[in-house]
Image: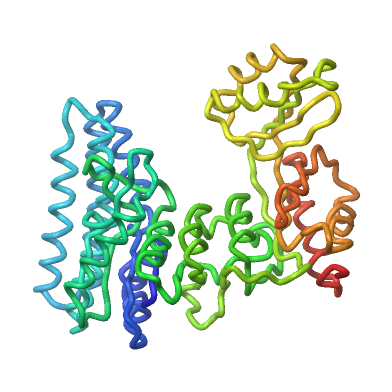
């Protein structure tokens, strides 16, 4: 069995839904299809919830009306017969009626999560009805019946596997199943979600539960590229990545993949393939536990980085200094990306400055604190184990004309990170492409 996930742009219009229908009905292998909401839907639902938090029903109704019109147009273009057009209209109307019923004085996160679930519920129902109109049998599987998080808001893998397999056992002869990405129930049985990008996570969790042959993530780009195609001309898809390489790229800026999604697949040794709905014959990117030794694969960049330098003469030969520093970030629930140390100080980077003022105030107990803003982390990914000679030299020499604030290497065998001014981002990415991918030498000395 394969698991195929299609993102919002892949189901963003009637024509694209038809295209996805053709893709998921090709071949004989059983498959579970995971669908996101139509492109733009989740953003609109978030906006509706925001208006309701602010007690602005008129604003909420305006967005609801605009979104419902979008769905009405899609339904009109998608279905050829009055019967199925009416069934789709009734289904979608029921969801918008539910949203309108939540316009009330008391609006909480409970109601918000109910609203946010509507997008995936509508897209799966529309797909199921379209397939039925075409005479193609499909079985809806409600994610709310098997996808659940625990009290720590983490996926409950045992519950997911047990309940999903029980559902599948009820349809032993079926070949095509349709379910929602992103949405779930929490430990209290309430409608919840796996956060933004959670449809990728859903697909990976399902793949692990059913021991899928492959998890396919279909988007509007032909795999993960070796650099940012919005900035660098001539980027190419990376045909093979190790799970750890893919996770590094996703975390540091490659938007095609959600950083958390591949963990269940990695743990179950299930390949993940990134494919393009617009170019279904393109090979895309295959992510697995295999590693191409001594090879640099790709470059990514993470924006809006702040660097914090804590300098203390008392750090020399002192114990407990670093523990206190990192406890400060932990106390303010602020993750750290990069870390470098010297005899008298620590430099760290964060991408969320929400608690920066409080963090700096606390850190001043331990030393002098300096802040640098408007920075970017450039991440070079591949098999960068220290035994492979020359890779670090090639990376750093590519940036000989660019000021580098920090370098982090050795924390992972798959990542060398450099902190640079945001103004130099484009120049750095292009220089790295020229030196790492356009040059004839592709691998390090073994």
Q: Which of 193 and 214 is in front in this view?
A: 214
Give the residue drawn at x 39%, y 63%. 203
| Vertical placement of residue 318 versus 408, above or below | above
Q: In this view, does 273 lie to the left or right of 31?
A: right
Residue 8 visible to an observer of this rendering: no
Q: Which of 392 and 227 is in front in this view?
A: 392
Q: In this view, does 400 lie to the left or right of 38?
A: right
Question: Which residue sits furthest top?
Answer: 365
Question: Which residue sits furthest bottom?
Answer: 28
Where does the C terminus fall, quadrant-wise? bottom right
**The quadrant where residue 374 appears:** top right
| Vertical placement of residue 242 versus 340, above or below | below
Residue 159 visible to an observer of this rendering: yes
Give the residue drawn at x 49%, y 73%. 276
**The quadrant where residue 285 appears:** bottom right
The percent coordinates of residue 71 (x first, y second) are 25, 59
The percent coordinates of residue 427 (x first, y second) are 79, 52
Q: What is the image's colouring?
A: rainbow
Where does the N terminus fall, quadrant-wise? bottom left
- The count of marks equals 0
Give the residue drawn at x 17%, y 37%. 102
Give the residue drawn at x 84%, y 61%. 387
The percent coordinates of residue 297 (x first, y second) are 71, 65
Q: Is residue 425 left or right of residue 30?
A: right
Q: Nearer the viewer, residue 275 or 202?
A: 202
């Amino acid at each position: 069995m394969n698991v195929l996930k299609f993102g919002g742009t892949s189901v963003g219009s009637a024509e694209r839904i038809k295209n996805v229908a053709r893709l998921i009905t090709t071949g004989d292998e059983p498959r579970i299809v995971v669908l996101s909401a139509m492109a733009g839907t989740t953003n609109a639902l978030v906006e509706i919830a925001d208006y309701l938090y602010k007690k602005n029903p008129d604003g909420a109704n305006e967005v609801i009306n605009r979104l419902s019109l979008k769905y009405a147009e899609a339904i009109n273009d998608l279905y050829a017969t009055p019967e199925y057009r009416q069934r789709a209209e009734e289904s979608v109307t029921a969801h918008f009626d539910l949203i309108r019923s939540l316009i009330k004085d008391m609006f909480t996160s409970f109601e918000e999560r109910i609203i946010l679930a509507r997008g995936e519920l509508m897209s799966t129902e529309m797909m199921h009805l379209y397939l039925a109109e075409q005479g193609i049998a499909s079985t809806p599987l409600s994610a709310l019946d098997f996808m659940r998080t625990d009290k720590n808001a983490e996926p409950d893998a045992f519950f997911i596997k047990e309940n999903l397999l029980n559902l599948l056992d009820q349809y032993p002869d079926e070949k095509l199943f349709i379910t929602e990405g992103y949405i779930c129930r929490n430990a209290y049985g309430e409608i919840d979600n796996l956060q933004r990008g959670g449809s990728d996570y859903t697909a990976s969790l399902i793949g692990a539960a059913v021991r899928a042959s492959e998890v396919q993530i279909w988007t509007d780009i032909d795999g993960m590229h070796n650099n940012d195609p919005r900035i660098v001309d001539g980027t190419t898809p990376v045909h093979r990545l190790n799970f750890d390489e893919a996770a590094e790229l996703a975390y540091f800026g490659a938007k095609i993949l959600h950083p958390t999604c591949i963990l269940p697949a990695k743990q179950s040794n299930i390949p993940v393939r990134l494919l393009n709905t617009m170019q279904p014959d393109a090979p895309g990117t295959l992510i697995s536990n295999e590693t191409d030794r001594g090879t640099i694969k790709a470059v990514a960049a993470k924006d809006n980085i702040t660097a914090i330098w804590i300098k203390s003469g008392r750090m020399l030969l002192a114990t407990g200094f670093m523990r206190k520093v990192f406890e400060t970030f932990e106390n303010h629930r602020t993750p750290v990306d990069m870390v470098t140390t010297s005899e008298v100080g620590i430099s760290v980077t964060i991408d969320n400055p929400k608690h920066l003022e409080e963090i700096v105030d606390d850190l001043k107990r331990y030393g002098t604190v300096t802040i640098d803003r408007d920075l970017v982390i450039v991440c070079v990914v591949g098999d960068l184990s220290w035994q492979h000679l020359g890779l670090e030299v090639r990376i750093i020499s590519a940036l000989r004309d660019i000021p580098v604030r920090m370098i982090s290497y050795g924390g992972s065998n798959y990542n060398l990170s450099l902190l640079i001014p945001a103004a130099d981002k484009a120049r750095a990415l292009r220089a790295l492409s020229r030196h790492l991918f356009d040059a004839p030498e592709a691998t390090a000395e073994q």
